[in-house]
Amino acid sequence: MAAAQAAHWQWENAAAGSVAGFTTVTFSHPLDVVRTRFQVNDGQNPHLPSYKNTRQALFTIARSEGLRGLYGGFYPAVLGSTISWGLYFFFYSKAKQRYLKNRDELTPGLHLASAAEAGGLVCFLTNPIWLVKTRLQLQTPQHLTQPYSGFHDALKTVVKDEGWKALYKGLAPGLILQVSHGAIQFTAYEELRKFLVNSRFEQSVLISNSADLLTTIDYATLGASSKLAAILVTYPFQVIRSRLQQRPGIDGIPRYVDSWHVVKKTAKLEGVRGFYKGITANLLKNLPSASLTFVVYENILNMLTLPRAD
């Protein structure tokens, strides 16, 4: 009976995560496009447009490329985000259930292990989707190569022209990013949440359900705070991954060979600032998104009156 309830709880977490991911990516995608274009612009590629700041980039893309430019790669972004959040919450809750055996509660280390495990699995399963998203977002009128007509055309063309291994470009920094980012974010979220619940519980011992102790504003603040901590630590890996996932030029030669090549070239030409290009757009996109994601996630669980695996 307990096993059946645990499995039910895991699938409900996957559903809650998927809905949350779909909701947030719909509103934040233009900022994702801007972030990606800033990340890959090393000043050495004449076919990539340059922008002064996030606001100017949004207006320039809207004026020269329209909604098609602002929502380039939208389908794989929605697909990837929905699948990623769903799988992440599923694997994360499954890991927590496993670690909870013979324990009353999880330690910070076990929260970290659960998040890291979930992040690694999600990254491996979704890397091809993110590679296609990055390439579609970078398609501009200045590109000389034949543009991809859409998600499926991009997948077929990548495999045809570069081989199936190309679908996993950026996997190494992606794994480090996904595992460390998710681990930092979820550990911070869980520990901050636990602190709030304990402090509120001391003030209101008559409330037995921890969900009743926290408000929507609490969930939004917790989501944004934990996301900020994760972004500041892991952002350079996003830049490395985006640069590796760029489409090769008409000569078929990629701009970067591997992660170490990206690190050396970026450090030499751009310094530390090069590893944080696009972070403003990233913060504008992800802090509100993280708040909304956890508000949706927690409230869906509350509506279903499901217990959390704390």
Image (cartoon, helix red, strand yellow):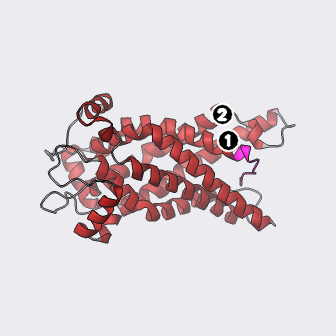
Q: State the image coordinates of residue 275 (x, y, percent, origin top left).
A: 31, 46
Q: Nearer the viewer, mark 1 or mark 2?
A: 1
Residue drawn at x 33%, y 65% as measured from the top left: 167
Magenta segment, which residues?
301-310
271 or 278: nearer the viewer: 278
Q: CA distance from mark 1 to mark 2?
A: 8 Å
Mark 1: amino acid: Asn
65 or 126: nearer the viewer: 65
The picture quadrant where one finds residue 244 is bottom left
Residue tagged by mark 2?
216
Residue drawn at x 16%, y 62% as measured from the top left: 253
Residue tagged by mark 1?
299
Task: Characterize the magenta stretch by its predominant secondary structure.
Answer: loop
Q: State the image coordinates of residue 39 (x, y, percent, origin top left).
A: 29, 45
The picture quadrant where one finds residue 276 is top left
**Who comes first in sequence, dot 1 or dot 2?**
2
